[in-house]
Amino acid sequence: MTTLAVVLLVVVMLATDFFIIGALFSSLRATMWKPLSDAYPPVPAKSDAVRREFQSIQMGLFNLGMCVHLAVDSEHLHIEPAAMLRFFRMTGMSVPWSEARVVRRSRGNKWITLRIRKVEIKGPGWAFGLAEPS
């Protein structure tokens, strides 16, 4: 294979990957993220809120490892997208605890799955544990 053929093959493969990844993130935004962020616009976290950056959550089939910043206070779960998700035009949201229902808890409450409207979000127990505390 010539050098030009290898370069063209790599370019075509990368373009295909970027197209597929863009389509997947567009689907995530349209079907799950945007309805929640429109329903629960971001509000400032209280001064006593606990905040951790680059946390992992899962929305439906999408595992967003290290892609969100989470803050929790007595009234809201604040989800702020990291730079990669902001690139795909995802915005932050502040979900009131009254709107979140616990679906599942892992052993030891390391991971908790919440249902917010019709979307299931799996996240760390330290943050999601304020929804229906046990």
Image (spheres, rainbow, N blue to C red):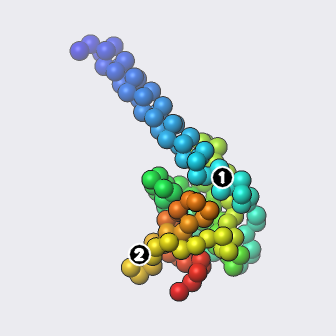
Q: In which quarter of the image is the N terminus?
A: top left
Of circles 1 and 2, the one toward us is 1
Residue identifier under label 2: 106
Q: Answer with the quarter of the image where residue 43 lies.
A: bottom right
In the image, 99 versus 84, the foreground residue is 99
> Residue 6 vs residue 25: left or right?
left
- Tell me if residue 90 can be seen: yes
Vertical placement of residue 43 versus 110, above or below: above
Vertical placement of residue 81 versus 13, above or below: below
> Residue 43 vs residue 106: left or right?
right
Which residue lies at the image location 71% right of the left edge and 75% below the top edge? Answer: 75
Q: Distance between the residues labelled 1 and 2?
A: 27 Å
> Residue 49 vs residue 127: left or right?
right
Which circle marks residue 123 in the picture? none
Q: Earlier in the sequence, mark 1 or mark 2?
A: 1
- Tell me if residue 54 can be seen: no
Which residue lies at the image location 45% right of the left edge and 53% below the top edge? Answer: 61
Which residue lies at the image location 52% right of the left edge and 62% below the top edge? Answer: 120
Residue at the limit of the structure toward the front, as seen here? 118
Question: Please, what is the three-letter code of the amino acid marked with disc 1?
Answer: Pro
Question: Please, what is the three-letter code of the amino acid marked with disc 2?
Answer: Ser
Which residue lies at the image location 72% right of the left edge and 57% below the top edge? Answer: 39
Q: Answer with the quarter of the image where residue 76 lies.
A: bottom right
Residue 69 is situated, as x and y percent measured from the top left of the image, at 59, 61
Helix, strand or loop for disc 1: helix
Vertical placement of residue 50 versus 86, above or below: below
Residue identifier under label 1: 35
Residue 31 is situated, as x and y percent measured from the top left of the image, at 58, 48
Helix, strand or loop for disc 2: loop
Residue 90 is situated, as x and y percent measured from the top left of the image, at 63, 48
Contact (Cβ within 8 Å) of mark 1 with mark 2: no
